Amino acid sequence: EGFPLAQPQNQRNTPSSSNMITPAQAFLLSTAGNSAMCVTLPRKQVTDIYLNGSQIQENSEADAGWRFFGLAGGAACAAVYLADKNINNADDRKILNGAIAANAIGNAALFVQHKFMEDHVKPELRWLNLGMQAGVAGLAVKALLDKK
């Protein structure tokens, strides 16, 4: 059967263009790795790559938040995957795509406007994440506007 994200689960969630991924697949690809990293890797190892060095390295509150994000992101990935796989009507598909769009737009806004992102995240990683979230939002908004 192969990798479950490689193909849409059914015809109802097939993108209008055969070479595009679905909004749910984009969400999963943009979130699952970050979530797993936040739960499993030492925070300092990741912040040395991701942040510009001006942040406080040892911070138990931030570490707890980092782990909670990872767990919540993992749960969100499971929920989106199951919803994408099992939705069989247009109204529910719109709700899922709307939620994906809202989440991605909110994430993109944080990468643009949040002071921590501006002050502490390496610019190239800030803009990479912003671009990724804008792409997820674009796919979801396009799916919302498609007349199917």
Image: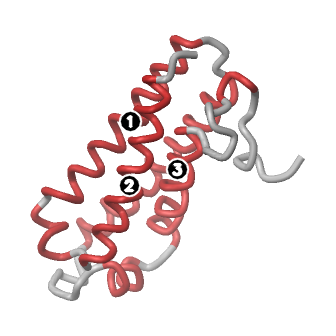
Whether residue 19 sits left or right of residue 31 in the image: it is right
Whether residue 31 sits left or right of residue 18 in the image: it is left
The structure residue drawn at horizontal position 52% and vertical position 39%, both measured from the top left corner, is 23
Judging by the rendered image, the residue that carries numbered circle 3 is 74
How many neighbours does mark 3 have within 10 angstroms: few (below 14), some (14-19), or many (20 or more)?
many
- In the image, 59 versus 25, the foreground residue is 25
Identify the secondary structure beneath mark 1. Answer: helix
Disc 2 versus disc 1: distance between alpha carbons? 19 Å
Indicate the position of residue 26 as horizontal and vertical percent values.
Answer: 54, 47
Query: Which amino acid, mark 1?
Result: Ala
The structure residue drawn at horizontal position 37% and vertical position 84%, both measured from the top left corner, is 49
Disc 2 versus disc 3: distance between alpha carbons? 8 Å
Rendered view: 125 above or below 16: below
Q: Which mark is residue 69?
A: 2
The structure residue drawn at horizontal position 40% and vertical position 32%, both measured from the top left corner, is 141
Judging by the rendered image, the residue that carries numbered circle 1 is 101
The structure residue drawn at horizontal position 26% and vertical position 71%, both measured from the top left corner, is 60
Tag 2–tag 1 contact (CB < 8 Å): no
Q: Specify which label sits upstream in the sequence, 1 or 3.
A: 3
Query: Which amino acid, mark 3?
Result: Gly
Disc 1 versus disc 3: distance between alpha carbons? 18 Å
Whether residue 5 sits left or right of residue 28 in the image: it is right
Closer mark to the observer between disc 2 and disc 1: 1
Query: Which amino acid, mark 2?
Result: Phe
Q: Specify which label sits upstream in the sequence, 2 or 1.
A: 2
Indicate the position of residue 19 as horizontal and vertical percent values.
Answer: 66, 46
Closer mark to the observer between disc 1 and disc 3: 1
